[in-house]
Amino acid sequence: MAEKRLNAGAWSFNELSIPTLITNRLIGTQGITDPSLKLMALKSGIQEGVHVFYGAHATCLSGENKQMSRDYPGVFSDWMVNHTPLDFAVYSAGAVASMGPETGPRQGFDRAQFMGEEMAKQVALIQQFGYPYENQLNLSFIRIPLFLRQPMVKISENWALRPWVFKWAFGHSPLEISMIQLNDLVMIGLPCDFSGELAVELYAYAKSKNLNLIISSFNGGYAGYVPDDKWYDLEKYEPRSMSWYGHDNGAYFVEIIKLLIDYNQS
């Protein structure tokens, strides 16, 4: 249906920093946060909308809450459509590992409401000035397999369940990295919860190559959490229970992403 309705359009990349809405949930104030909200504006005919990426994990509601909810991304999307001329607003997870929403003392649905509205108001400020649209597009796409060591689940700092136990319990998930380049914008989709701490370095690396970078988690299969390697032995959920592929997995992902950035620059 989409192919039959193809029409000329335009797009724009924008970026803003929202440090007040994100926290390092792994180690608190000792750690780096990724405050960058990446925004793609899309327009075709009279239809206009935005697609945003932000690193704060959509975990405003605790695991004790059994109600269906879109958490703060749903609040964000509804607010943008109801309070601006935009026809749609889409949210995708950025580099969410170790990153959590910062909402002060609020609890439950009040957290999601506050987070979504505050983010929407920041984006709406940009929308009022209009987006610098481009109607020329050089588009390329690749998908590459991701080769990792055998997975395991750590049960203590020095003990882990063997790979065959992991596969018996969780099965096998094909792992790939997806990449789309739109002019000077590179979008990389990763099959994991990728660390916001690592993303900050990669954004700067892309800028040094005159490129803009969007990193998105939860694309394709699932390889668990990929935190900064220096926290690998920390007795916390992300590095202890959910880092399945070894101590230097973070460095490996960073190296692969830098190679993709270099490939796009050439």
Image: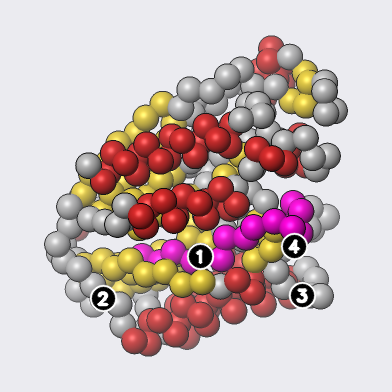
Q: Earlier in the sequence, mark 2 or mark 4?
A: 4
Which disc number belongs to residue 29? 4
Q: Residues within 10 Å of mark 4 (few under 14, many from 20)?
A: few
Q: Which element carries disc 4, helix, strand or loop?
A: helix
Work out how far the residue at label 1 is from the one at label 3, CA to CA, in angstroms: 19 Å
Q: Residue at x 65, y 66 (%)?
A: 22
Q: Residues within 10 Å of mark 3 (few under 14, many from 20)?
A: few
Q: Is residue 121 magenta?
A: no
Q: Which element carries disc 1, helix, strand or loop?
A: strand
Give the magenta part as a residue range: 25-40
Q: Residues within 10 Å of mark 1 (few under 14, many from 20)?
A: many
Q: Earlier in the sequence, mark 3 or mark 4?
A: 4
Work out how far the residue at label 2 is from the one at label 4, CA to CA, in angstroms: 36 Å
Query: Which residue corresponds to mark 3?
Result: 104
Q: Is residue 39 magenta?
A: yes
Q: Residue at x 67, y 51 (%)?
A: 98
Q: Which element carries disc 2, helix, strand or loop?
A: loop
Query: Which residue corresponds to mark 2?
Result: 132
Work out how far the residue at label 3 is from the one at label 2, CA to CA, in angstroms: 34 Å
Q: Indicate the quadrant containing the C terminus: top left, top right, bottom left or bottom right.
A: top left
Q: Earlier in the sequence, mark 3 or mark 2?
A: 3
The mark closer to the camera, 2 or 1, is 1
Relative vertical location of residue 181 with respect to residue 54 in this rendering, above or below: above
For badge 3, the amino acid type reads Gly
For badge 1, the amino acid type reads Ser
**Residue 206 image point, x, y percent:** 38, 52
Query: Which residue corresponds to mark 1?
Result: 36
Q: Are marks 2 and 4 in contact (CB under 8 Å)?
A: no
Q: Which element carries disc 3, helix, strand or loop?
A: loop
